[in-house]
Image: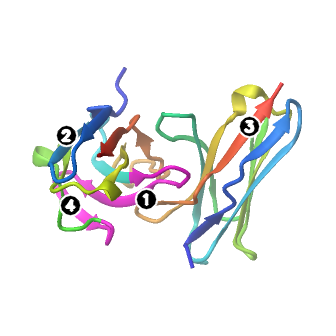
Amino acid sequence: DTGVSQDPRHKITKRGQNVTFRCDPISEHNRLYWYRQTLGQGPEFLTYFQNEAQLEKSRLLSDRFSAERPKGSFSTLEIQRTEQGDSAMYLCASSPRPGQGDTGELFFGEGSRLTVL
Amino acid sequence: QKEVEQDPGPLSVPEGAIVSLNCTYSNSAFQYFMWYRQYSRKGPELLMYTYSSGNKEDGRFTAQVDKSSKYISLFIRDSQPSDSATYLCAVNTDKLIFGTGTRLQVFP
């Protein structure tokens, strides 16, 4: 299967600890997105990359959050000093470069669920 | 005001019913409209995609956009228990902006 892959699927941590999530996009996709989804809500945009360049960050992304996409391939999302309010599903998505028949469709992974105790 | 508003439901219907799911959006500049389906503990997947106003049909699913009233609809005909999921409307700028999602339950 060559879909979007996320790891770990589930992470339980204590408040104050750091966590890191990894996303491997579909190989020919240049754009990579991170979203956060809490129970009963739709996904909320956090940030996105075009290749290795981080093009936009949401105001939701506090300074405890950092995302990287070295070499324009996989991406990591790190949360420092976790808080209980960070408990959510973190979704990664990828899409082809605009202009290549781009419908704007995002292809999502199955998410990394974070529980902060 | 949120950019995309959606009634969260839940909506419970018997098998075979026609389901109508709706969203409103705030920015008249939006041109691309999508419906994603999300099963429990899975990532969302694209169901329907519409550009500008009008209808689009795909099997039992019809997506409708009315730009004059900033209204997006998804109709499901002959609903099946396998349609039970959360349905998310979205508008596309350079990223997707989602509604809250409507949870649908189709019972046999």
Residue A89 falls in which quadrant of the image? top left
Q: Position of residue A82 (x, y in %)?
A: 22, 54
Residue B25 falls in which quadrant of the image? bottom right
C-alpha gap between disc 2 and disc 3: 36 Å
**Looking at numbered disc 3 in the image, what kind of residue is underneath it?**
Gln
Question: Which contiguous range is marked in magenta?
Answer: A36-60
Contact, mark 2 vs mark 1 (Cβ under 8 Å): no
Disc 2 and disc 1 on one polypeptide chain:
yes
Quadrant of the snapshot with the C terminus of chain B: top right
Q: Residues within 10 Å of mark 3 (few under 14, many from 20)?
A: many
* Residue on which the image places disc 2: A74
**Looking at numbered disc 2 in the image, what kind of residue is underneath it?**
Phe
* Residue on which the image places disc 4: A54
Q: Earlier in the sequence, mark 4 or mark 1?
A: 1
Task: Please report, as a chain letter, where disc 4 is located.
Answer: A
Secondary structure type for disc 3:
strand
**Looking at numbered disc 1 in the image, what kind of residue is underneath it?**
Glu
Contact, mark 3 vs mark 4 (Cβ under 8 Å): no
Q: Residue at x 39, y 60 (%)?
A: A45
Q: Is residue A115 left or right of residue B8?
A: left
Q: Is residue A46 left or right of residue B80?
A: left
Q: Earlier in the sequence, mark 4 or mark 2?
A: 4
C-alpha gap between disc 1 and disc 3: 24 Å
Disc 4 and disc 1 on one polypeptide chain:
yes
Task: Please report, as a chain letter, where disc 1 is located.
Answer: A
Badge nearest the viewer, 1 or 3: 3
Based on the picture, tell me whether residue B106 belongs to the magenta stretch: no
